[in-house]
Amino acid sequence: MRRVVSLFLPHLPIERLRRWERPARLQPDSLALALPVDALPVDADPGACSVPRGGGWRPGARWARAEPSSREEMQQQIDALPRHAQPAMRELGRRSEAADHPFKRIATIVPAQRYRTGVSHQEPMAVVGKVGRREQVVAVSPAALMLGIHIGMAATHARALVSDLDLRPAEPEADAQLLDRLALLAVRRWSPIAAVAPPDGLWLDLTGCAHLHGGEGRFCQRLLRFCRRAGFTARVAIADTPGVAHALARFGPDDLTIVTSGDTVRALAPLPVAALRLEQATLIAARRFGFETVADLLPVARGPLARRLGLPAIHRLDQALGAVAEPITPHSDPAMPMVERRLLEPIGTAEAIGQVMADLLDDLVLVLQARGLGARALRLVALRVDGGEQMVAIGTSRPSRDAAHLLRLLKLRIERIDPGLGLEQFRLVAPHTEPLGAVDLGQVLAGEALMRDPARLVDVVAGRIGEEAVYRIAPVASHVPERAVRRVSPIAVPGGWPKWQRPVRLFAKPEPLWSVMALLPDQPPRRFEWRGRTHKVVAGDGPERIHGEWWRRDQEVWAVRDYFRIEDADGGRYWVFRRGDGVDNATGDLSWWIHGIFA
């Protein structure tokens, strides 16, 4: 089932401006305010110390002299001065205020006006754009919205309504550029299919990649936190179709809305008609006929509804309900190598599709060669006539730009492509590339045999049976057998193996043995039953004691395993162990298990 995420940034123009207007502290020297000269006595020197040498005045007591005669007259003179020129309490010789912290003096002289533009984030702001022949408000901040400013209001009306309203000219190109950068980030980090939903949102196709982010709910929470850290208010919705996700992100009741699969109609019904992305004339006609919500449109027949609202309204409604496909044109990453072919006529045969693959690979190899890269993964996207998409992908174990090898891998995927009525457009993308230098041909030129690269064989086998089925075993520094190995790439060179005698086939989980007869504490079993058969042991060697890894969990602090290599009467050799040392009950329950087969 398709799952589409809609990201809505309701205050994008406002928050984009404020993001670039970060707080900037002014220089302390420019903020220093001195007392005016005309406010001082004639014999006073504003630049010199107010205390004469050898005098009895304490520092800063200029205002404590005999003239004026009374404290009331002195206070009147102080009140007559401008506010910025009034002396501080310490200048007046008083000691009642607390002294400033020595490391916070710069912060104390910075005024409240801290921004370059003189606008705080709480002050009302509006963005004005030219619509037709008049200027009107196209975006408002929450503070301006509370004062009665709304989108669509004339700019002159907004200025008259709020005198201190900060009006900025609209910059749609800058907003679109920011959305393009956000879509490029989404393609590289979140989903390979992401597109801009103009003028203030994004679409992300999360089909098949939600588990990479911990599920849909966790991904949406991460997306909201990312936007919050970037300084943007965001709303997110997930639904089966782009139309429903777009509508819920803008008209839904919550900032985060996740619609379960198959619940599209119930989520779309209570939303207003404007959620269907209709033109203004269509919305006026809907109000005239009494259509307020989408639920009012659903029971009406398509013919009368088309005559009242027009065919675009029917098309938008069918797209939201999933009756008509609405493909998302993915944002192209300029740094990602990509080639494209548009055909004159649709094709549908395997031979024609293979020829298009060969042509696309020839073009892509030239792009990779010019950048000095090799492809580790390729993704072929084919667009059908009916608007559907078919996508296949391949991977390589090493970076490669060999067109013949890559074409062989792509042809293994032709049977997975459903051409339908025909394929008319192809796009080949290399989402994962690595640097690839020149190939050393010294041995070939010298006439020596060139050692074949096993990576090509690995790629072909992995293309047939799956990448997970082709791997190599590498050692891990652990004494516990099931933790002592790990899967690595089939072309990787594993490290040195310890000189331990281990079975050829090691079970993923040990299997229990029944009816075991053994002499405690150090003798191998003489008889046991496994998978319904009785085995009589004729030879055995051991024990090899392995202790549990106490740093992993408490159950392994005292755990002990005693391993034995045994051989039965039929010649089968097995690797079995007993839990516990046979003396202390805390080390194990003395049960027997088989862990591998030697031959």
Image (cartoon, rainbow, N blue to C red):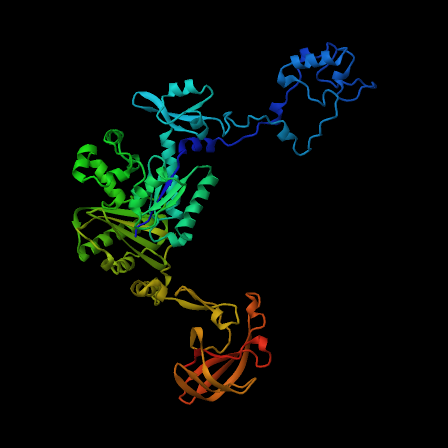
The answer to which image quadrant residue 285 occupies is top left
Where in the figure is residue 548, as x and y percent of width and height? 55, 71
The answer to which image quadrant residue 411 occupies is bottom left
Q: Residue at x 66, y 14 (%)?
A: 79
Q: Residue at x 44, y 25 (%)?
A: 147
Instruction: Name the quadrant of the C terminus.
Output: bottom left
The answer to which image quadrant residue 414 occupies is bottom left
561 vs 109, nearest the viewer: 561
117 vs 490, nearest the viewer: 117
Please, which residue is most extreme toward the top here? 42
**Seen in the image, is 161 located left or right of residue 412?**
right
Where in the figure is residue 306, as x and y percent of width and height? 18, 36
The total number of labels drawn is 0
Where in the figure is residue 196, as x and y percent of width and height? 34, 39
**233 up-or-down from 445: above or below:** above
**Seen in the image, is 161 located left or right of residue 356?**
right
474 vs 42, nearest the viewer: 42
Residue 549 can be seen, yes or no: no
60 vs 447, nearest the viewer: 60
**126 up-or-down from 379: above or below:** above
Where in the figure is residue 511, as x and y percent of width and height? 44, 76
Residue 403 can be seen, yes or no: yes
